[in-house]
Amino acid sequence: MNAQKLQEHDYKRGMMPEATPTPNHQPDKTRVVRHVEQRKKKSLYSIKSILVMSALAAFGILFGQLYLDSQINRVHYEIQELRFHIGNQQIANDQLYAQISQLSMSSRVMEVASEHGLSMQGGNVIYIQN
């Protein structure tokens, strides 16, 4: 009777007896064959999700590269603009230095002094710089 209950219990669990015991055989020698279904291992990500993530990553990298290229071009433009302004300012500075040297010539100083009623004693002009 115990062997019959054991068989029913094993049958419900998915185990099939290899041979059914007969009253002539002892129930302890019954072999049970178990049929175990192998489950497929599930990967963490499916192939489809990996492809989608790869496409998104490629799009992100492409967008990032385009953004960085535009920023680099903007900086180059600003550099060229500043160089242009520096060149213009150097030209203006050179013109002002030429005007300063022209106005500070000794003949010019003597002319301005005589216009204001100053006379020259000894013929020496002394330059005083701040």
Image: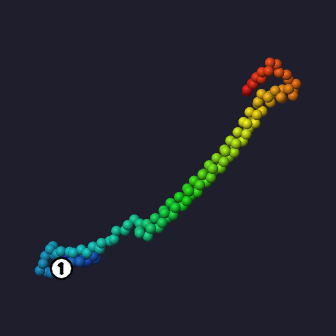
In the image, taking residue 105 as reference, residue 12 lies left or right, namely left
Task: Say which residue appears at 38% left-offset and 66% top-offset.
Answer: 43
In the image, taking residue 121 as reference, residue 18 lies left or right, namely left
Residue 68 horizontal/vertical position (percent): 55, 56
**Type of residue at label 1?**
Ala
Instruction: Return the residue nearer the eye: 103 or 75.
Output: 103
Q: Quadrant of the C terminus?
A: top right
In the image, taking residue 18 as reference, residue 129 lies left or right, namely right
Task: Say which residue appears at 60% left-offset and 52% top-offset.
Answer: 76
Instruction: Return the residue nearer the eye: 34 or 126.
Output: 126
Q: Is residue 1 visible?
A: no
Q: Quadrant of the N terminus?
A: bottom left
Residue 6 horizontal/vertical position (percent): 22, 75
Residue 46 horizontal/vertical position (percent): 41, 68
Task: Give the quadrant of residue 115.
Answer: top right
Instruction: Return the residue nearer the eye: 129 or 123.
Output: 123
Q: Is residue 58 above or below residue 92?
A: below
Residue 117 horizontal/vertical position (percent): 88, 25
Other-residue count near label 1 (Cα within 10 Å), few / some / many at <14 / 14–19 / ≥20: few
Task: Say which residue appears at 79% left-offset and 29% top-offset.
Answer: 107
How is this picture coloured?
Answer: rainbow
Q: Is residue 19 above or below residue 82?
A: below
Q: Is residue 122 visible?
A: yes
In the image, taking residue 5 as reference, residue 29 lies left or right, namely left
Task: Give the quadrant of residue 50.
Answer: bottom left
In the picture of the structure, the residue carrying the numbered disc 1 is 19
Task: Say which residue appears at 11% left-offset and 80% top-offset.
Answer: 24
Instruction: Return the residue nearer the eye: 105 or 65.
Output: 105
SS for dot 1 = loop
